[in-house]
Image (cartoon, rainbow, N blue to C red):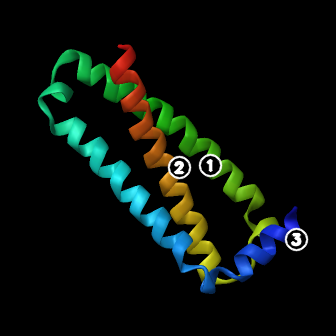
Amino acid sequence: MTESLKSFFDNLPTNHWSTLVIALLSIIFIIYSLYFYFSKEGKDERGKKIISTASFISFIVTMILLFALSNLFYDIASYNQVSYSWILNLAVLIISGTEAIGIFILKKSI
């Protein structure tokens, strides 16, 4: 498995589509979270509860990602700048996606 991941990171300069998809999804998730925060629904008591719960879940995911990246980065990625920036972009996507999906799910359940 590590060999296939290493070959994926070695071929990243030719795979610009993955970086563009990650950046686009991150922007969409961040805009959705900001839209909910500044909307009328996000300013009442229920909205603040939704935002705080989603932010707490996102914080836990951030800590897990930082731990995983610090331990696994040198085993998986090559030593080049493209793979490093791709992994950081993926981490931002996962964190912002957790926040936006948490808001979306909690909006329906709370």
State left or right for residue 34 relative to residue 95. left
Disc 1 secondary structure class = helix
- Left or right of 103, for residue 86: right
Tell me which amino acid carries mark 1.
Answer: Leu
Label 2 is placed on what type of residue? Ile
What is the C-alpha distance between the residues marked 3 and 2?
23 Å
Give the percent coordinates (x, y) of residue 38.
16, 38
Whether residues under marks 2 and 1 lie with C-beta atoms below 8 angstroms apart, the answer is: yes
* Quadrant of residue 104 within the rendered picture: top left
Find residue 50 and report its horizontal and vertical position in percent: 33, 23
The numbered dot on residue 46 is none
Residue 11: x %, y % from top left: 70, 82
Q: CA distance from mark 1 to mark 3?
A: 21 Å
The answer to whether residue 34 is left or right of residue 5 is: left
Q: Label 2 neighbourhood size at 10 Å, few (<14), some (14-19), many (20+)?
A: many
Q: Quadrant of residue 33?
A: top left
Please name the residue that numbered disc 1 is placed on. Answer: 65
Q: Residue furthest front?
A: 17
The answer to which of marks 3 and 2 sits earlier in the sequence is 3
